[in-house]
Amino acid sequence: MTTIATTTAPPRARKLVGAGRRQWIGLLYVAPAVALVVVFFLIPLGMTAWMSLHNWPLMGERTYIGLGNYVAILRDTRFWNALKFTAYYTVIVTIAIFAVAFPAALFVERPRPLTNLYRTMFFMPAVVGFASASLLWSWLLNVDSGLFSPAAYELGLIDRKFNLLATFQPAFWSIIAMVVWKVAGFTMIILMAGLQSIPQDLQEAAIIDGAGPFARFRAITLPLMRRTLALALILSVAGSILAFDQFYIILRGGPRNQTLTAVYWIFNQSFVSFKLGYGAALSMVLLVILVALSLVQLWLLRKPEGLD
């Protein structure tokens, strides 16, 4: 008589097999996102870094020059002036955006009559592309056929039509106004989400303890919104450093090249002068600056220990 023995895998082995299967399933789920990052970020980044080591004209033979392009950047006064203007613009526009977005977020945070209408009105410009918004404001700022200067002249507010784009200060603040109109609604939504995530119990407990609005804002709202503020700040700073559309479409770098941004100069070197290798080196330098600034912002707005 023959006895057939049946064996089963130990429980630990079954758990390991199940865990491995779940890991492979998880990898399959993230594979499309990883593929997108590799194809549209890592590979172009590697190609840009490689191009930056070459004298790479649009037509003709490319030659390897090592760090020659980076050495040339040190002597490029136009780039450093553009970087200086970009930093100035970034500081001013970021302060202006938050000065508008934060009060708007506080205003629309809680339900009240017409709150949804206010939220929609504030957010609506954010759905317009920067190129389209720049074309719109280019028309609005036109001295003859636009809206601002002709309307002010017809209303008797000014003696003659005034070209807002002819000198630096009016042109610069016109760009600031356009960007705030375009971006503040998006920043408002981010800040509003952070405000709504704060437990209402904390606010009520502070009110019972006698804390005023400013004390609650300083001790509760700001500490609990550090991550939200970090996100909004990084997005604002990164977008400002990479500013191009509004300065290219509305000002063309004028007046007298006073509004050349870093990205505008990279565009000029790459697609006007056709020095693709040098433009790639400028792009790598700007990327390093952007990453460094983002890390500094994250460090400054890091969550304090013991704060949940």
Image (cartoon, rainbow, N blue to C red):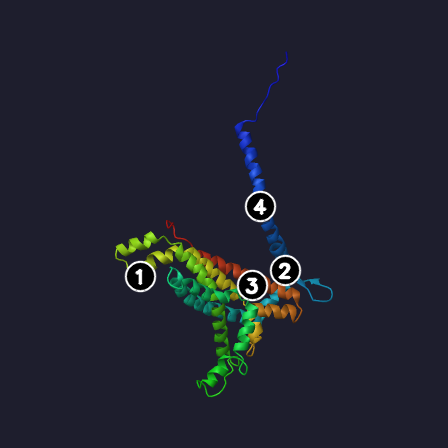
Q: In the rendered structure, which disc, 2 or 4, sits on the residue that comes first in sequence?
A: 4
The local secondary structure at tag 4 comes to helix
Query: In front here: 265 or 173?
Result: 173
What kind of element bears circle 2? helix
Q: Specify the amino acid type for callout 1.
A: Pro
* Dot 2 crowding, Cα within 10 Å, few <14, some 14–19, many 20+: some
**Residue 251 on image: x %, y %:** 56, 76
Question: What numbered label is drawn on residue 29?
Answer: 4
Q: Residue furthest bottom?
A: 159
- Disc 2 target residue: 48
- Residue 215 versus residue 247 in the image, above or below: above
Q: Are marks 3 and 4 in contact (CB under 8 Å)?
A: no
The three-letter amino acid code for the residue at tag 4 is: Tyr
Identified at 51% across, 62% down, the residue is 238
Nearest to viewer (mark 2 / mark 4): 4
Within-10-Å neighbours for mark 3: few <14, some 14–19, many 20+: some
Q: Which is nearer the N-term, disc 1 or disc 2?
A: 2
Residue 105 left/right relative to 23:
left
Q: Which residue is mark 1?
A: 213
Res 189 seen here: yes
Q: Amino acid at mark 3?
A: Leu
Q: Is residue 210 left or right of residue 142?
A: left
Instruction: Please tell me whether mark 3 sits on a helix, a strand or a loop.
Output: helix
Q: Measure the alpha-carbon separation of dots 3 and 1.
A: 41 Å
Q: Residues within 10 Å of mark 4 (few under 14, many from 20)?
A: few
Q: Residue at x 57, y 37 (%)?
A: 20
Q: Which mark is residue 286?
A: 3
Q: CA distance from mark 1 to mark 4?
A: 46 Å
| Quadrant hosting residue 58 | bottom right
